[in-house]
Amino acid sequence: MPERPVVQDSEDCPRTFAFGMIDRFSLMSEVAAIDTLRVANRLLGRTVYRWQLLSIDGGPVRASNGITIESDGRYELAESADIFFVCAGLTPMPEPLSAYHAAIQRISRSGVGLGALSTGTFLLASAGLLDGYRCTVHWENRPAFMEMFPGIDCTAKVYEIDRDRYTTSGGAASVDLMLKIITGDHGLELASAIANQLQHDRIRPADEEQRFGAQTFLHPLPGKLRRAIDIMSSHLEAPLATATIAYRTGLSARQLERLFQRYLQVTPARYYMRLRLERSRDLLLHTNVPVLDVAVATGFTSSSYFSQCYRQAFGQTPSTTRRIAVMAGERVEK
């Protein structure tokens, strides 16, 4: 883990960010955030940011990669921080849930800003602390989040800042969120210098969307092809015909076929099926939605056809995926 900064004389009053670790949290998401703050201190030659690593009981916490991290104390220490970030990963709804809710609600009542890295958004939402706020979460967990919290505006953005709520989609997005905060505190020049130090090729804006699953590409795609993919992604429950998608993008069906073959080496129909199956896998892994309902939610009217397509794509049946998720404890429970 990055070293804790030593408080130095400074013209600025250092801001303190507290990170509340949850069992099996994403170490990458946390370290990405902290190291961005560390580099800010180093480049300025003084401490403008401090951080605390906290746990619900003050003891060590095991990350999702098996590494155990010592804490600086209990969550209560965050009541004097500027922002408290929930750091989660494979178990976003930890037990005892009531203890986590009570601790974070106390922190909120003390006037501290609240944030979440990766799946930490689930805990804030379940504690009632995202009502009326925009937020984001990792793309893999977004379907589960929207199923559990339909009244909360959960976007597909890389990160979201809505008043005193700061949420990220996890991983390298923690760097982007911290750079945005640092830009507000100390200017774009410092944020750019930090990005260069971290080999972060650019500072992603808050309105940039995550790339996910079949939508991750090595090269930019033509606008009409991106539009076609967006249309597919928005109609997974009731799939559209290729001709309809082509019409909505201003192309003929043949032109759309050629675009998919040229840039993705696949037909539109096969790509569409891939999107639907990836969404079904996300729902099986991260929600309690029954397998039959998962099939319907991703455009399959026949459970046997769904199972056949799923097995061809992932080498196992939908029921097997669900069983593995239960055994691994990766599902999000209410």
Image (cartoon, rainbow, N blue to C red):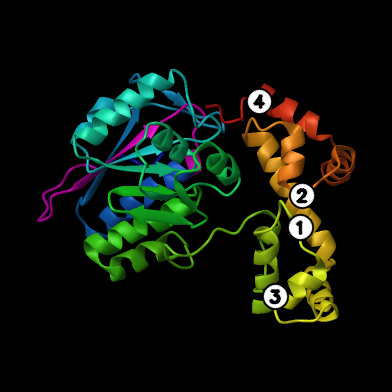
What residue appears at the point 25 percent right and 28 percent down from the top-left corner?
A: 106
Q: Give the x, y percent position of residue 93.
A: 49, 28
Q: Which residue is mark 3?
A: 248
Mark 2–mark 1 distance (CA, rounded to whole Å): 6 Å
What residue appears at the point 50 percent right and 43 percent down from the top-left corner?
A: 150
Q: Residues within 10 Å of mark 4 (few under 14, many from 20)?
A: few
Q: Is residue 21 above or below residue 13?
A: above
Q: Given the image, on which type of amino acid does mark 2 rest?
A: Gly
Mark 3–mark 4 distance (CA, rounded to whole Å): 42 Å
| 116 sits to left or right of 82 | right
- Tell which of 286 and 188 is nearer to you: 286
Q: Is residue 43 above or below residue 58?
A: below
Q: Give the x, y percent position of residue 140.
A: 61, 45
Using the image, tell me which numbered label, if any, was put on residue 328: 4
Closer mark to the observer between disc 2 and disc 4: 2
Q: Given the image, on which type of amino acid does mark 3 rest?
A: Arg
Mark 3 or mark 4: whose residue is earlier in sequence: 3
Q: Give the x, y percent position of residue 240.
A: 76, 62
**What are the residue bounds of the magenta stretch?**
5-28
Using the image, tell me which numbered label, if any, was put on residue 239: 1
Report if residue 319 lies within the magenta region: no
Q: Given the image, on which type of amino acid does mark 4 rest?
A: Ala
| 18 sits to left or right of 306 | left
- Tell which of 132 and 85 is nearer to you: 132
Using the image, tell me which numbered label, if any, was put on residue 123: none
Q: Which residue is mark 2?
A: 299
The secondary structure type at the circle numbered 3 is helix
